[in-house]
């Protein structure tokens, strides 16, 4: 993830308070430095110190290069073992990429562009297409107009299925997860939760909820309507505030307890600050499942 706010960068021009006021070349020429003391950065200071702002194309190129290296390593390993049955599917090398269409209502983020389809969203779509990465990319935004524009520009669906080729995710922040929480009432009156109604209205494939608005009934309802789910966590500063002042029962940081509670709602994906913690939790759950599924005679062996 990237932090694209002026608070994260030193030496911003007072006449250009937003990073959106600069061209990419200007950002390079200004030799801007990231603020290593900014609490929104979860990674080590020495990494931030040498950080740069890449273009979307550069990020996608790095991902492609990484995938190619992983594929070569797997092929080499499989050749050494000479066991075709253990060969990995190439799809396992493909990262799932989520491109968030950001920028709020900044003057440069118009999607109408005088009714010209050459708006910035079109350029993003064409870049992903040129790099042959459409199957592994989804486009998300808090701005439903952006998602509607993606769907208007790229309405294609997979043959004989209701699924779109260009996937989109509707992001939501401060919602009421208990809206119409009476399941029987919803069944009788066919009431949709507002997030589902909004996502469907713009043809979204996924709904991304803030982590503390995920509930079992809401996640189930979203899945019932054929939409995938993701929980997103606030930045490090926001998470530290939440676990310190709002949620007293989840420890003193963004830890396994927090991730486990969200996981149990049934949400399918999580956007987090500490992947190492989630990986550790996932491994613990895997071992616990293995132990539970062990035959009784194996459990009794010493």
Image: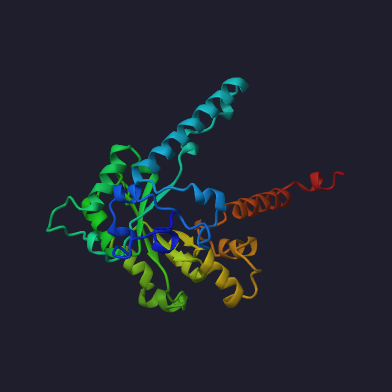
* Foreground of the two, 145 or 119: 119
Quarter placement of the C terminus:
top right
Describe residue 193's horizontal placement relative to residue 93 as left or right: left
Describe residue 243's horizontal placement relative to residue 104 as left or right: right
Describe residue 263's horizontal placement relative to residue 175 as left or right: right
Task: Report x, y in % for residue 202.
Answer: 28, 62
For residue 73, above or below residue 107:
above
Q: Which quadrant would residue 298 be assigned to in this image?
A: top right
For residue 62, above or below residue 255:
above
* Foreground of the two, 226 or 111: 111
What residue is rendered at 37% in x and 67% in y? 196
Task: Report x, y in % for residue 264.
Answer: 58, 63
Task: Report x, y in % for residue 80.
Answer: 61, 20
Which of the colour schemes (rainbow, by chain, secondary structure, one colour) is used? rainbow
Q: Which quadrant would residue 146 be assigned to in this image?
A: bottom left
The total number of labels drawn is 0
What residue is rendered at 37% in x and 41% in y? 58
For residue 125, above or below residue 130:
below
């Amino acid at each position: 993830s990237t932090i694209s706010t002026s608070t994260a960068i030193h030496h911003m021009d007072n006449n250009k308070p937003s990073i959106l006021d600069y061209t990419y070349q200007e950002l390079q020429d200004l030799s801007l430095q990231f603020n290593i003391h900014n609490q929104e950065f979860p990674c080590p200071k020495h990494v931030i110190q040498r950080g740069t702002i890449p273009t979307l194309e550069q990020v996608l190129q790095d991902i492609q290069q990484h995938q190619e290296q992983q594929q070569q390593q797997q092929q080499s390993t499989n050749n050494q073992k000479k066991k075709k049955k253990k060969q990995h599917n190439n799809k396992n090398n493909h990262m799932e990429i989520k491109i968030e269409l950001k920028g709020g209502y900044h003057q440069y983020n118009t999607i109408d562009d005088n009714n010209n389809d050459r708006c910035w969203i079109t350029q993003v779509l064409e870049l992903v297409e040129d790099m042959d990465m459409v199957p592994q990319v989804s486009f998300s935004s808090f701005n439903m107009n952006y998602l509607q524009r993606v769907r208007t520009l790229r309405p294609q669906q997979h043959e004989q299925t209701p699924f779109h080729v260009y996937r989109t995710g509707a992001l939501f922040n401060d919602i009421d997860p208990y809206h119409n929480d009476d399941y029987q009432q919803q069944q009788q009156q066919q009431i949709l939760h507002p997030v589902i109604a909004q996502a469907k209205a713009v043809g979204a494939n996924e709904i991304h909820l803030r982590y503390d608005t995920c509930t079992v009934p809401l996640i189930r309802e979203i899945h019932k309507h054929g939409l995938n789910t993701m929980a997103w966590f606030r930045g490090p500063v926001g998470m530290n505030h939440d676990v310190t002042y709002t949620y007293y029962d989840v420890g003193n940081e963004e830890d396994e307890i927090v991730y486990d509670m969200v996981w149990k709602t049934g949400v399918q994906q999580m956007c987090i600050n500490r992947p190492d913690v989630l990986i550790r939790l996932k491994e613990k759950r895997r071992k616990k499942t293995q132990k539970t599924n062990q035959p009784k005679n194996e459990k009794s062996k010493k």
